């Protein structure tokens, strides 16, 4: 990739080496997907884990879409 800019490269790529995304796998609407949490109840869809080609045509599940979700804490009774 060629990038032409008057801005120095160290300014453009500042912080790129320290970026560590926190991905989670959830099921929403019967579709398994990988998300990246943004805030407490919002997340960005990263990818779908579906074998059904029709799921990839649904606009509301397109990668990059912001969705609302509720994190559920699992507890173990021992």
Image (spheres, grey):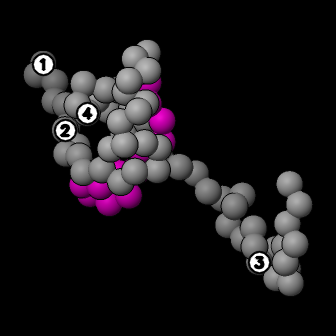
* Quadrant (top left, top right, bottom left, bottom right) of the N terminus: bottom right
**According to the image, label 1 marks what residue?**
78
- Which SS type dominates the magenta stretch? strand
Query: Which element carries disc 1, helix, strand or loop?
Result: loop
State how many labels appear: 4
Name the residue at 46% across, 50% down: 64
Q: Which mark is residue 28?
A: 4
Image quarter of residue 77: top left
Q: Which mark is residue 66?
A: none
Name the residue at 32% across, 60% down: 39
In percent of width and height, residue 73 lies at: 19, 37
In percent of width and height, residue 60 lies at: 32, 44
Is the Cβ of the residue at disc 3 closer than 8 Å to that at disc 2?
no
Q: Nearer the viewer, mark 2 or mark 1?
A: 2
Q: Which mark is residue 72?
A: 2
Question: From mark 2 to mark 1, how far is it between C-alphas?
Answer: 19 Å
Is the Cβ of the residue at disc 2 closer than 8 Å to that at disc 1?
no
First in sequence, mark 4 or 1: give its number: 4
């Amino acid at each position: 990739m060629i990038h032409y800019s008057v801005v120095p490269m160290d300014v453009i790529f500042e912080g790129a080496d320290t970026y560590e995304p926190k991905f989670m796998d959830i099921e929403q609407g019967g579709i398994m997907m990988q998300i990246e949490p943004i805030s407490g109840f919002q997340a960005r869809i990263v990818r779908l884990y579906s074998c059904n080609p029709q799921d990839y045509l649904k606009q509301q599940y397109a990668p990059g879409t912001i969705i609302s979700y509720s994190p559920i804490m699992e507890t173990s009774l021992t």
